[in-house]
Image (cartoon, helix red, strand yellow):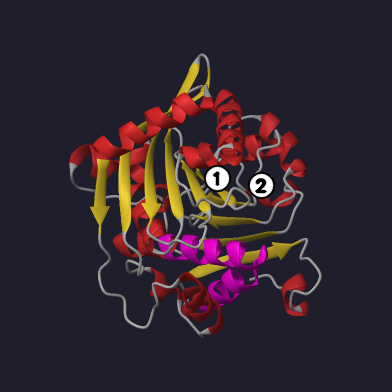
Amino acid sequence: MIELRYIGVCIVFSLCACVHNPQFVSNFSSHWPTLKKQVISQDLELEAFYAQGPFSFREFLDFNITISPKHRVNTDFFRTSNRFNPALAVIVHGNGYNKFAHRVQAERIASWGFHCLVLNLPNRNYWLENGKKIKRLISLIRSYPRLLARNINPNRIYLIGHSFGGSASVLATGYGAPVRGLILLDPAMVHDSVKDALPRVSVPSVILGADKRVFKSKRRSQFFQHIGGPIAEVSIIGATHTDAQYPSIHKVHWGFDLVTNRHIQNRFLGALIASLFSLTSSDRLEFAWYLFRKEIKKGHMKKARVKFVPDGVHASLKKLRY
């Protein structure tokens, strides 16, 4: 059954693939081991990740994955040209939103050498069930990574969840989805069962939040308080909830957007990619945190905090709070 499904996937890919070649990005290599050394060892600014990365990628749109006899998940898959067993980032949209609100984020992630899968889930009233679907999907990909690509590293899968998609990502991880880390984009708590699942999240996590003076996401503080593993949190000054999308849902629906700010969207995007490099390179948060501290000094971020820091992290991180 799996083999037949895999053949069907290949057919869909051949019909829907679209190739995107990279714009020129100075000083960055398209050789993955060299790029990782460049990114981690250089004294970079977060702005380095605002631009497209050095890798080309292919889009496979409206790719349906069967996760059970009764359930399929609609996705868009962005396959990077990085050949060194790339990690997979899985993006989960929020309440009332859809996969199109994260398209630019997915393209940019793929251009920096990560495969990216964007899910399209029921976007109202089904978030507890969505958590179970995500868990089944991640488990399937872990067991059969060639459903998506020949070179996915099944041991390097990361969940990125926005708003209630953050709740669904936590639930999936709490249910046992084999992920290596979480990145939560201004997460909101949909139900008390999410709070119950947070202590079971032992993987490193990053919370990239909106400015609470502009938008206060539902019970966001409880994610930091109750997650069981290492976690870092920052708020982006001036950001509203939909700044954590790119393009925003307003842009998708209406063709223009008077709510979000392109500079702040780029800041979210840069922080997202920096977090991916940090998690995939060391399973730790130091690299991302170093860049976040720079942004705090520039006045772009605030309310930064870290907890449950593993051994080996700079001692200053254990007590640092802005």
- Image x and y of residue 114, in percent: 46, 57
**Which quadrant of the figure has residue 232?**
bottom right
- Image x and y of residue 297, in percent: 52, 80
Give the Cα separation between the discs numbered 1 and 2.
8 Å
Q: Taking 295 as reference, is 111 left or right?
A: left
Work out whether mark 1 precedes mark 2 in sequence or the reverse, and give the earlier one.
Answer: 1
For label 1, the residue is 187
Kind of residue at disc 1: Pro
> Magenta span has 255?
no
**Which quadrant of the figure has residue 322?**
bottom right
Residue depicted at x 43% and y 66%: 270
Residue depicted at x 43% and y 73%: 31
Other residues around mark 1 within 10 Å, as few (<14) / some (14–19) / many (≥20): many
For label 2, the residue is 223
Residue extent of the magenta highlight? 269-294
- Image x and y of residue 120, in percent: 41, 32
